[in-house]
Amino acid sequence: MIIDDHNHIWIGQATGEGWTSRPLTVDSLLSAMDRAGVDRAGICSLAQDIQNEYVLRAQREHPDRLLGYCFVNPRDKDAPETLRRYLGEGLVGLKLHPRLHGFPLNAMRLVDPLFEVCREHRVHVFAHGAGLEEFNPPHYFEDVAQAFPDVTLIMGHMGALNEVDDAIRVASRNPNIYLDTSACDLFGVQRAIAALGAERLLMGSDWPASDFRLELLKIELATEGHPGAFAQIAGGNYERLFLGNL
């Protein structure tokens, strides 16, 4: 089974710029998945315009294809209850975007209540983790991972492009941290496989930022010479870690 853990859907008035330049509909996502042969995809809305209801509806209408994350801003005083509500409705994890919501990932006063809810519901946390962004460097992931060793934490973009080596080192010390391949270059994914093995990586395309076919090719090339590694990164690890709880 091919599973891509990191993608976005959004509907609204197109602004003509950036992520909101056009609607990111469920139908367009599914069409892109079908072209590439992707079986299932993790989805969330945009940090710029959180639409958890749309994500929940998409998952309910396509339960065999889509896995929805609840997106919250920890600065919202109702964030823990919002998260608890949507996890109770069936969403499968939490999505955080420290840069766009303006909080350090290791601001424990803000994130502790959310991680407690995730621990209670036995779901994982997916956080944006691109390199050289002041709010989500790899060592902030380590702080949170050590505070909540029983909550699985996915580092989106695995520190790409400038902090991949730091991301790999942090993941090597914290078994509850997994690295998402989106935006990372081929060499970075190869380094991660060499250091961690294929068991700690998850394929992510960050659709529509990339094409599923491009990400699949990157994983195929990165796993050459590693028997079984492609199947693990391109779906097996996600299935093993998370689908058993659903």
Image (spheres, grey):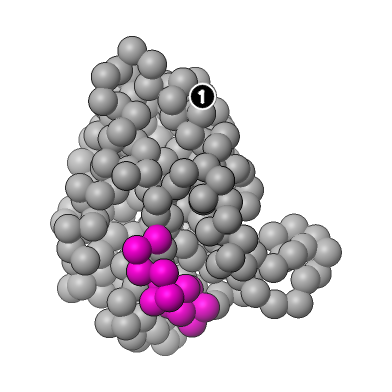
Residue appearing at x 26%, y 69% in the figure: 118
Looking at the picture, how far across and down is residue 3, in whole percent? 38, 48
Q: Is 85 or 81 nearer to us in this picture?
A: 85
- Please name the residue shown 56% across and 67% down the image: 26
Q: Magenta residues, as a range?
A: 53-65
The quadrant of the image that shows the N terminus is top left
- Residue drawn at point x = 41 percent, y = 41 percent: 203
The type of residue carrying mark 1 is Leu
Rendered image quadrant of residue 15:
bottom right
- Magenta span has 61? yes
Left or right: 191 as drawn, with respect to 146? right
**Residue 171: in sight, yes or no?**
no
Q: Nearer the viewer, residue 135 or 57?
A: 57
Measured as percent of width and height from the top left, residue 205 is found at 52, 45
- What residue would you read off at disc 1? 186
Identify which residue, 56 or 15, lies in the foreground: 56
In the rendering, at what x and y percent does residue 150 appear? 16, 56
> SS class of the residue under badge 1?
helix
